[in-house]
């Protein structure tokens, strides 16, 4: 137990700013993120089920933050169902790479379902492997895979619908 | 598409480096022959690379809690030593076993103020306690796990020094909102080795000490019989000579069934 406690303390130190970023992404408010992180640190250090493996501890801490967020902020709103089990048909879609830029992706992320946004951010922003995301979200790895692929499709669709275009693209159109 | 089994899910996993070597090679080979597939991989790669950061400003991040010097404990049974050591290491001003002769009423004043401040801050925002915590404090709190008494740690604060001695205040909530405070600091002359009643106004206080530390349990609205039983159980929990076995946990559970429910 002492070993896992030290592991969690070290993991908290090493991931503090990332955990804050995650809390901020979940809450959308800096003060709420600070409160959430404090509560999460308490929960993590008080947990009897903390992992002793340092690598596992990172994903576990993200999970603790997420669970605390669910407890505090949106217990009534968390969806228990998603559309991950519905297969994506192999259509003939295609997207214009030139419209994909940080600004359009940011706007697109703001438009898609929070559950989808979350899985994209865990993989692409926080750099988690699918297995780690499965730990954070407490879902099977296969569900992570399907949820992520649907999320990216939704994101591409949201970007395609956006009016905002990156500057390079606008310059190209003027020519 | 030259390989009809390469689905959108698989393309995503390919871009994320989640496929094994054989499957990865298969996707790469298929993309070499299929411009549509290659375009989708390009799109996904660019999408992945364009995910913006969280946009955190440095001043927004709450400071990393100061980590008290780590200490070793063999098991949960030595919780009281751990709590004492943590306080000593985190605060650095306590002298084990030394009583603080002039501060007897001051420690109680501080403990009562902490309890009232916690109640006040919680009532202003009923949905949230606002814990002020250091990792060292939380670690000490972990050692004082009162979950067997249905009390969840929700608040932790270090207290300003009184007569050169600092202390810590932990706040626990029951399932129906009952707020129980636990003051931990230096042993005081007004304390005995078993819980002693030191009620002040509307707040019930039970205080005791062991060889190294002083403790006080505080609650407003808790049945006197219940806080007596709870204090006895917590005193056993904090006694370094006490073996924490099922009987201690049972005592904690029994305390919650003693007297009438807490009035919040």
Image (tube, rainbow, N blue to C red):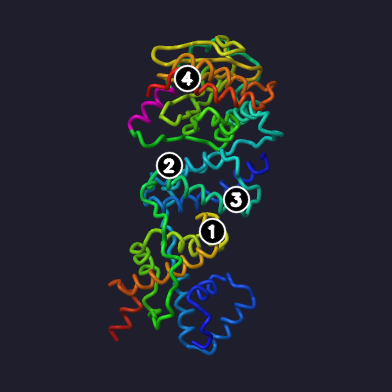
> What residue is at 53 percent from the left and 85 percent from the top?
B3
Q: Which residue is tagged 3?
A: A57
Check the residue under mark 3 and report the chain it is in: A
Is B152 drawn above or below residue B263 in the view shown? below
Q: Is residue B195 left or right of residue B224?
A: right
Is B20 drawn above or below residue A52 in the view shown? below
**Residues in magenta?**
B114-124
Q: Which mark is on residue A134?
A: 1
Q: Which residue is tagged 4?
A: B218
Disc 4 and disc 2 on one polypeptide chain: no
Quarter of the image where the C terminus of chain B is located: top left
Q: Mark 3 and mark 2: span between their CA atoms? A: 21 Å
Q: Mark 3 and mark 1: span between their CA atoms? A: 14 Å
Check the residue under mark 4 and report the chain it is in: B
In the image, residue B260 lies at what x, y percent?
43, 19
Q: Quadrant of residue A158?
A: bottom left
Query: Regarding mark 1 in the picture, which secondary structure is present there?
Result: helix
Q: Mark 1 and mark 2: span between their CA atoms? A: 25 Å
Magenta stretch encompasses residue B258: no
Disc 3 and disc 2 on one polypeptide chain: yes
Q: Which residue is tagged 2?
A: A35
In the image, residue B211 lies at what x, y percent?
66, 17
Q: Which mark is on residue A94?
A: none
Magenta stretch encompasses residue B116: yes
In the image, residue B228 lies at what x, y percent?
52, 15
Q: Mark 4 and mark 2: span between their CA atoms? A: 24 Å
Query: Regarding mark 4 in the picture, which secondary structure is present there?
Result: strand
Q: Mark 1 and mark 4: span between their CA atoms? A: 42 Å
């Amino acid at each position: 137990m002492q070993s896992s406690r030290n592991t969690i303390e070290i993991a908290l130190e090493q991931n503090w700013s990332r955990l804050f970023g995650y809390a901020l992404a979940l809450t959308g408010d800096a003060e709420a993120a600070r409160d959430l992180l404090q509560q999460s640190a308490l929960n993590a250090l008080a947990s009897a089920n903390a992992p002793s493996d340092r690598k596992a501890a990172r994903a576990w801490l993200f999970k603790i933050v997420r669970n605390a967020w669910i407890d505090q902020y949106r217990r009534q709103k968390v969806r228990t169902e998603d559309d991950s089990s519905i297969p994506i048909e192999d259509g003939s879609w295609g997207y214009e790479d030139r419209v994909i830029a940080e600004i359009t992706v940011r706007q697109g992320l703001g438009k898609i379902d929070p559950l989808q946004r979350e899985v994209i951010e865990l993989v692409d922003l926080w750099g988690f492997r699918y297995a780690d995301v499965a730990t954070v979200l407490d879902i099977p790895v296969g569900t992570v895979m399907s949820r992520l692929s649907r999320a990216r499709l939704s994101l591409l669709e949201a970007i395609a619908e956006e009016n905002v275009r990156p500057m390079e693209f606008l310059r190209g159109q003027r020519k | 598409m030259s390989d009809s089994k390469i689905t959108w899910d698989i393309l995503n996993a390919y871009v994320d480096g989640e496929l094994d070597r054989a499957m990865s090679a298969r996707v790469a080979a298929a993309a070499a022959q299929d411009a549509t597939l290659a375009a989708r991989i390009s799109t996904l790669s660019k999408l992945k690379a364009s995910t913006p950061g969280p946009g955190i400003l440095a001043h927004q991040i709450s400071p990393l809690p100061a980590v008290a010097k780590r200490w070793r404990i063999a098991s949960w049974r030595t919780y009281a030593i751990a709590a004492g050591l943590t306080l000593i290491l985190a605060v650095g001003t306590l002298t084990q076993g030394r009583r603080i002769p002039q501060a007897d009423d001051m420690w109680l004043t501080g403990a009562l103020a902490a309890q009232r401040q916690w109640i006040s801050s919680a009532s202003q925002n009923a949905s949230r306690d606002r814990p002020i915590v250091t990792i060292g404090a939380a670690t000490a709190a972990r050692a004082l796990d009162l979950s067997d008494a249905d009390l969840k740690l929700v608040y932790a604060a270090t207290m300003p020094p009184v007569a050169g001695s600092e202390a810590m205040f932990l706040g626990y909530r029951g399932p129906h909102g009952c707020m129980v405070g636990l003051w931990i600091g230096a042993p005081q002359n007004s304390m005995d080795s078993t819980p002693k009643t030191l009620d002040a106004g509307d707040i019930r206080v039970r205080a005791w000490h062991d060889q190294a530390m002083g403790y006080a349990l505080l609650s407003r609205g808790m049945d006197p019989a219940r806080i007596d039983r709870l204090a006895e159980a917590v005193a056993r929990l904090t006694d370094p000579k006490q073996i924490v076995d099922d009987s201690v946990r049972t005592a904690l559970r029994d305390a919650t069934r003693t007297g009438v429910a807490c009035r919040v």
